[in-house]
Image: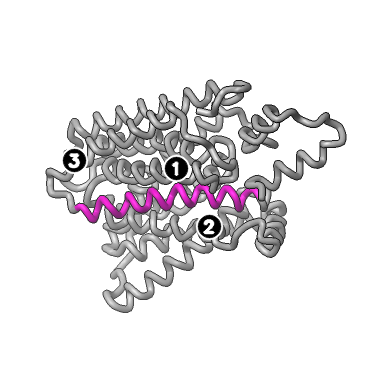
Amino acid sequence: MSQNPETDDAAAAHSSNRPAASAPDARSAHRHADTAGTRLPLWLAIAFALGCGALTALQSRINGELARAIDDAYTAAVISFGSGLVILLVVLTMWRPGRRGFAAMAAAVRDRTLPWWMLLGGLAGAWFVLTQGFSVGVVGVALFTVAIVAGQTLGGIVFDLVGLGPGGRRPLTVPRIAGAALALAAISWTVWAQLERDVPLVVMLLPFVAGVGGAWQQAVNGRVRGVASSALTATVVNFAVGTAALVAAMLVHGLSAGWPDALPGDAWLYTGGAIGCIFIAGQAVLVRIVGVLVLALCGVAGQLTAALSLDLLVPTGERGVDPATIGGTVLALVAVVIASLRWTRNRHAPGLPEA
């Protein structure tokens, strides 16, 4: 069965007006099927992906600060995800295509063209927000983001190879392998320096697992967005599932450990949900254009740059930024250039493998 039902439908609709494609042309069309029907230039998609990455790092700082202010990562996560869900539901009442998307999504699940488990991307988002509360205050935004990037890079490679995203399978090429290897080298460099400073290994594993889950979330949310023809539909489903999971976790934790004494009065601590709405919806659209791995690596640049800036300008706790963190960030940016810009140049070159 095709990984891209929308592209197949479009091809069938126009087959009577177009001669049959030769075998090489058909292979090329399949390879680039992920951009069919979009008018967004690839360079602009990459720029938006960078912005999504920066927003991810900003949300990490906000949610981490909220969790520290109330001393409860579970309640902080519910506040972040739940406020995002409320915002999306309000927008949904005013956006008819988003409401129609639910009918299309339900039909795809009934027809088994969309597996039901692809609706559970919000579980990965819930875990991501929880790890922000657990880890950011301990290791800082930059190191937290480096661990996230490690998981996203490995997850992006695997999910592109198996064709989980809406663009189908994307083979590994030399630029992609080199970019991923450099990103992992940057992560190893930075993490090693921090582990020597007695950062608990489990605190680093939490965001790493969240990074793998984030790549999976981007892929399945992109598939939901494809069948629903609405990023809003996919984002509402994502936030609804994540909020339900976090509320259950908060209730279990609250009944056993108690509840926060009071909530802080700083309004900016409650903006994490709104920021999440923006970058989750953006990723659901962009993954179809650039693929899981390139979306993750483009997000690296935005995440690490914003995270490092936050740690330098507004540090958390007493943990500073050492040269290894700065060097690892620079090396990760070089990895993004190699993987994404080389891929951009070859993106529409006929007969060339996709980088």
Amino acid type shown at disc 3: Trp
In the displayed structure, does residue 88 sit left or right of residue 246? right
Q: Earlier in the sequence, mark 2 or mark 1?
A: 1
Q: Position of residue 161 (x, y in %)?
A: 49, 42
- Above or below, 31 relative to 160: above
Residue 307 lies in quadrant: top left
Task: Find disc 3 in the rendering and name its residue.
Answer: 192
> Principal SS element in the magenta part?
helix
Please name the amino acid that badge 2 sits on.
Asn
Q: CA distance from mark 3 to mark 1?
A: 23 Å
Q: 203 and 20: which one is in front?
A: 20
| Residue nearer the viewer, 30 or 97 | 30
Query: How far apart, in angstroms, are the residues tagged by discs 3 and 2?
Result: 34 Å
Crowd band around label 1 with a 10 angstrom C-alpha radius: few (<14), some (14–19), many (20+): many
Secondary structure beneath dot 2 equals helix
Mark 2 packing: few (<14 Cα in 10 Å), some, or many (20+)? Answer: many
State yes or no: residue 322 in magenta.
Answer: no
Q: Nearer the viewer, residue 56 or 221?
A: 221
Q: Which residue is mark 1?
A: 156
Span highlighted in magenta in the image: 201-226
Horizontal and vertical percent for residue 286? 55, 39
Amino acid on which disc 1 is placed: Gly
- Residue at far bottom of view: 255
